[in-house]
C-alpha cells in the first residue's frame, strides 16, 4: 500500500533534482526571469511536465510575501509616447506573470506624485514602475520613502533608481545626420515642451549634431506636442522660408506643419524636408509619407520588466537599460533644391 509520502504532490525541489539544476533556477523559470538560457528553460519545463508539478501561488505568496503585482504610476497618457510606453510595460508584465495596478495622474507635480505613490504602496506591491516624462521626476521620487524596487521609464535614474529608456538624443542625431547627408545646412527644430524629458533630450541631440557639423542652431521653435502647435509654427516658417529642412519633435506636430506648408504652397520635400519622431501608425499615410524616428515600445517594456525582475528576485542595484531608436526614411525628405 502506498504511503502518504509516495502520494505527495511534486515539489519545486523535485523538479530541481529531475532537471539537475538548483531550486533557484527552477524558480526563475517559473517566474519567467529573463536571465535563464533557452536550454536550461527547456530542461526545467520538461521536468515540470514529466512530474506534473503545479505551483501553489497562494502558498508561495505567503512564504515570499509577494503579490505578483507591479504598480505603475503614469502621466500624460493622452500623448502617443507615454500611452504606448504604458502598453509595452503592461504586455511585458503579463508575459512575466505579473498583474499590473495603474494609477494615472493629470498633473506631474510633487504633491500629486507623492499621493499616487502612497496609494500604490498601500496595495502591498512587489515594485513600482514610473512613467512620468517630466524633468525633476528623479528628485521628486528621491524625497519619498520607498521600500519596494522602483524603475523609472524614459529618464535616467541618476544612480538612485533603475531605469529603462529610449535613447532620445540618438534619435535626434539620426534625424539630423540624415538631413546633413542629403546636403541640408539650414536645419531647424520644432521641439516639444522643454519641461518634458523627451523634449529636452531631442532638442539637445539636434543642437549637438549641428555643432559637430559646424552648423547654426538658431532655428529652434517650441511646440506642445499637438498638431495645432505644429500648424501655427508651420505658418510662421512658411512665411519666413528660413530653413531647408526641419526636425520635428513628434509626428503629430509634423502633421500640423505639413498642413500649414500645403496651404502656403511650400512643397515637401522639394522646398523643405521634414523629419518627425515616434513613427505613429498613421505616419506612413501622411502626404507625403513622413520620414521619422521609430521607438520600439514593446522592447522598452521588456527591458523595463527585466530590470524590475532583477531588482525583485536578485536585489540588483540601480542600473540603466537603453533601447536604440531607428530612422525610417520615407518621402518627406530629399536633397535641397
Image: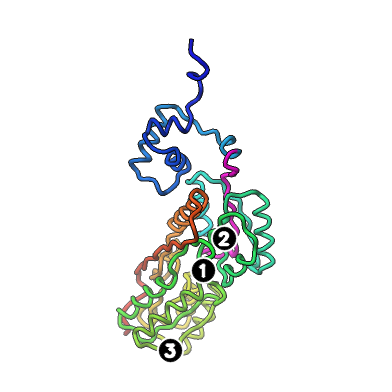
Q: Which residues are magenta?
A: 63-82
Q: How is the model colour-coded?
A: rainbow
Q: Outermost residue toward the top?
A: 1
Q: Residue at x 41, y 38 (%)?
A: 22
* Along the viewing direction, whichever of 149 and 329 lies nearer the viewer: 149
Q: CA distance from mark 3 to mark 1?
A: 38 Å
- The answer to whether residue 175 is visible is yes
Q: Is residue 136 left or right of residue 285?
A: right
Q: Earlier in the sequence, mark 3 or mark 2?
A: 2
Residue 102: horizontal and vertical position, in percent?
Answer: 61, 54
Q: CA distance from mark 3 to mark 2?
A: 40 Å
Q: Earlier in the sequence, mark 2 or mark 1?
A: 2
Q: Which residue is mark 3?
A: 242
Q: Residues within 10 Å of mark 2 (few under 14, many from 20)?
A: many
Q: Which residue is mark 2?
A: 130
Residue 240: horizontal and vertical position, in percent?
Answer: 46, 90
Q: Residue at x 47, y 40 (%)?
A: 27
Q: Is residue 209 left or right of residue 85?
A: left
Q: Residues within 10 Å of mark 1 (few under 14, many from 20)?
A: few
Residue 157: horizontal and vertical position, in percent?
Answer: 52, 66
Assess whether residue 71 is covered by the magenta stretch. Answer: yes
* Along the viewing direction, whichever of 298 and 310 lies nearer the viewer: 310
Number of on-image labels: 3
Q: Which residue is mark 1?
A: 158
Residue 99: horizontal and vertical position, in percent?
Answer: 56, 46
Foreground mark, 2 or 1, reads 1
Q: Quadrant of residue 138?
A: bottom right
| Label 2 element class | strand
Q: Residue at x 39, y 69 (%)?
A: 289
Q: Quadrant of residue 128?
A: bottom right
Query: Mark 3 near mark 2, Cβ–Cβ under 8 Å?
Result: no
Amino acid at each position: 500500500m502506498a504511503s502518504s509520502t509516495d502520494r505527495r504532490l511534486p515539489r519545486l525541489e523535485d523538479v530541481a533534482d529531475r532537471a539537475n539544476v538548483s531550486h533557484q533556477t527552477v524558480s526563475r523559470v517559473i517566474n519567467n526571469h529573463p536571465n535563464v538560457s533557452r536550454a536550461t528553460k527547456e530542461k526545467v519545463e520538461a521536468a515540470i511536465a514529466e512530474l506534473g508539478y503545479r505551483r501553489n501561488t497562494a502558498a508561495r505568496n505567503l512564504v515570499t510575501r509577494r503579490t505578483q503585482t507591479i504598480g505603475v504610476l503614469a502621466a500624460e497618457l493622452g500623448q502617443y509616447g507615454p500611452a504606448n510606453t504604458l502598453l509595452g510595460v503592461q504586455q511585458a508584465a503579463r508575459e512575466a506573470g505579473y498583474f499590473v495596478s495603474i494609477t494615472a495622474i493629470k498633473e506631474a507635480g510633487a504633491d500629486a506624485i507623492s499621493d499616487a505613490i502612497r496609494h500604490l504602496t498601500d496595495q502591498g506591491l512587489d515594485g513600482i514602475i514610473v512613467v512620468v516624462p517630466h524633468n525633476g521626476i528623479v528628485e521628486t521620487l528621491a524625497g519619498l520613502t520607498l521600500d519596494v524596487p522602483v524603475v523609472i521609464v524614459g529618464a535616467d535614474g541618476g544612480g538612485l533608481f533603475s531605469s529603462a529608456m529610449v535613447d532620445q538624443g540618438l534619435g535626434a542625431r539620426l534625424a539630423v545626420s540624415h538631413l546633413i547627408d542629403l546636403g541640408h545646412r539650414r536645419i531647424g527644430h520644432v521641439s516639444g515642451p522643454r519641461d518634458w524629458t523627451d523634449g529636452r533630450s531631442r532638442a539637445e541631440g539636434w543642437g549637438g549634431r549641428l555643432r559637430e557639423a559646424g552648423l547654426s542652431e538658431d532655428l529652434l521653435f517650441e511646440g506642445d506636442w499637438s498638431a495645432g502647435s505644429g500648424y501655427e509654427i508651420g505658418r510662421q516658417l512658411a512665411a519666413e522660408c528660413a530653413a531647408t529642412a526641419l526636425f520635428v519633435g513628434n509626428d503629430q506636430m509634423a502633421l500640423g506643419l505639413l498642413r500649414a506648408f500645403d496651404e502656403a504652397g511650400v512643397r515637401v520635400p522639394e522646398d523643405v524636408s521634414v523629419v518627425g519622431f515616434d513613427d505613429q501608425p498613421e505616419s506612413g499615410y501622411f502626404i507625403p509619407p513622413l520620414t521619422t524616428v521609430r521607438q520600439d515600445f514593446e522592447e522598452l517594456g521588456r527591458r523595463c520588466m527585466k530590470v524590475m525582475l532583477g531588482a525583485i528576485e536578485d536585489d540588483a542595484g540601480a542600473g540603466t537599460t537603453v533601447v536604440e531608436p531607428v530612422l525610417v526614411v520615407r518621402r518627406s525628405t530629399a536633397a535641397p533644391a
